[in-house]
Image: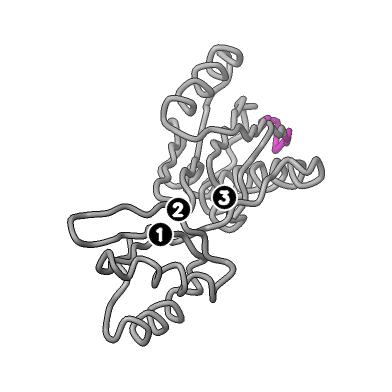
Amino acid sequence: MRRLKEIAVHRLREKASVFLTELHPARDAVERAAVLALLRKRDFDATHHCSAWREGVPATAQGADDDGEPSGTAGRPMMAVLEGAQVTDLIAVCIRWYGGTKLGTGGLVRAYTEGVQGALALADEASAWEEVRILRSGALRVPAAQAHLPFALLGAFPACEALEQTFDGADAVLRFQCPPELVPALDHAWQERSRGGSIDWD
């Protein structure tokens, strides 16, 4: 999954309508609202400010807005492109100036799709992305006298990272992160090492 680091802008003309698509880094609702407010103020004379956004690693929330275009012709196609590109923590805003010629449903879907695709391509050319790893979080609970056992398990999996160990009454709890593909192997290894124990996954 990739996270946007800087703004990317793409301009497209379709039958006298101008589509200006901008990608902006935005990690939460406050940042998205600020981007939209800025663009609406700057381009106050535009006909539509359609948008799509994704948030989180992995993406835990997303949304889209047709902003007056026929339902499903703008925000949804824009979102589909973002999903396919596996990008997150950004908002795509496509600003349209209507040129007097109707594009029809198919034409609108194509224009908004190509707008986001074009902005993504420019972001690729500018190396405007950072790779982000998707990690699973888990906890290993053992009697305090066996507090070393979770460390021994994680030592066999170099891709795992111990986060913190705490003590809860008579138990020791070690929290850790790991790539999701290691979950089955870790579950199996811990069952054997702890004689039937299980990992508490978030």
Residue topped by disc 2: 163
Q: Is residue 98 above or below residue 61?
A: above
Mark 3 → mark 1, Cα distance in angstroms: 26 Å
- Please identify, in this view, whether the residue under mark 2 or under mark 3 is nearer the observer: 2
* Residue found 61% across the figure and 44% down from its top: 3
- Mark 2 or mark 3, which has the lower sequence index? 3
Instruction: Please give the range of residues in magenta.
Output: 10-19
Residue topped by disc 1: 137
User: Which amino acid does the dot numbered 1 rest on?
Assistant: Ser
Label 2 close to label 3 by CB (< 8 Å): no
| Quarter of the C terminus within the rendering | bottom left
Residue 182 in percent (x, y) is at 49, 74
**Side of 186 relative to 127 (left or right):** left
- Mark 1 or mark 2, which has the lower sequence index? 1
Q: Is residue 11 covered in magenta?
A: yes
Magenta-colored segment: predominant secondary structure: strand
Q: Is residue 190 covered in magenta?
A: no
* Residue found 46% across the figure and 51% down from its top: 59
